Amino acid sequence: MDNDLDLADVRRVLEGEVSAFENIVRRWQSALVNLAFRFCRDPQIAEELAQDAFLQIYRQLPKFRGEAAFSTWIFAISLNLFRSAMRRRKLPMESIDTLTELAGGQIPHLQVEQQEREDLIRRAVAALPRRYRDAVVIYYFREMNLAETAAILGVPEGTAKAWLHRGRELLRRKFDPGAVVPAMAKEVCL
């Protein structure tokens, strides 16, 4: 996305041209709905969460200082909102051990069909502890670099790097000690 277009629209909104916010919504709607869907796995709830995120972004626009890319800023706001919403909803999570049992204790990407494998990986990532899951989703599935991932998570790059490493290790231990999780994760669209 073009940060210059975002900054121009932010400036227009702050100057009183509220309709310029529509451009921001059009540019970022699918990305935020997609991110929300990764948290809730329900298209309707994902759209509601994205709407809530845009409302929060609109309210917070006067606080945007431009120190980070606009995309980093909106993803950070959205991620916090989605986390809070999911804590309130208390969706059932499955343990990684259960998912390994479902795969018959075998290497999932060799034992199940493509769709089942993708679903198993999605569920395994969703079962990771929150900080590792968020880092993995942002870095691999949203394809952000380490600096952007750290900024969205609001942590130093070293912390984000450690969370990514620990998340990969948890996945690797559950599926296969020799599996290359980053390559596997890049193949799957959550």
Image: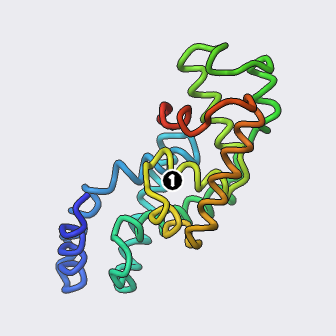
Residue type for callout 1: Ile
Q: How is the image coloured?
A: rainbow
Q: Please identify the quarter of the rendering in which residue 74 is found.
A: bottom left
Return the residue nearer the eye: 112 or 23. Answer: 112
Residue 188, placed above or below residue 159: above
**Which quarter of the picture shows residue 26?**
bottom left
Where residue 112 appears, as percent x and y from the top left, is 63, 14
Instruction: Please say if 138 is above or below 94.
Output: below
Q: Is residue 49 above or below residue 115?
A: below
Q: Quadrant of the N terminus?
A: bottom left
Q: Is residue 17 left or right of residue 39?
A: left
**Residue 162 screen position, x and y as percent:** 66, 60
Would residue 7 appear left or right of 54 to someone viewing this image? Answer: left
Q: Residue furthest front?
A: 178
Secondary structure of the residue carrying tag 1 is helix
Residue at numbered disc 1: 138
Mark 1 burial class by Cα count in 10 Å: few <14, some 14-19, many 20+? many
Image: 109 above or below 128: above
Task: Report the front residue among 76 and 180.
Answer: 180
Which residue corresponds to the image point at 38% horizontal and 51% vertical from the top-left? 31
169 to the left or right of 82: right
* Residue drawn at 35 percent across, 79 percent down: 61
Residue at point 59% right, 72% down?
155
| Residue 19 percent across, percent down from the top left | 19, 70
Question: How many numbered discs sit on the rendered protein?
Answer: 1
Residue drawn at (63%, 15%) of the image: 110
Determine whether, in the image, residue 149 is placed left or right of residue 166: left
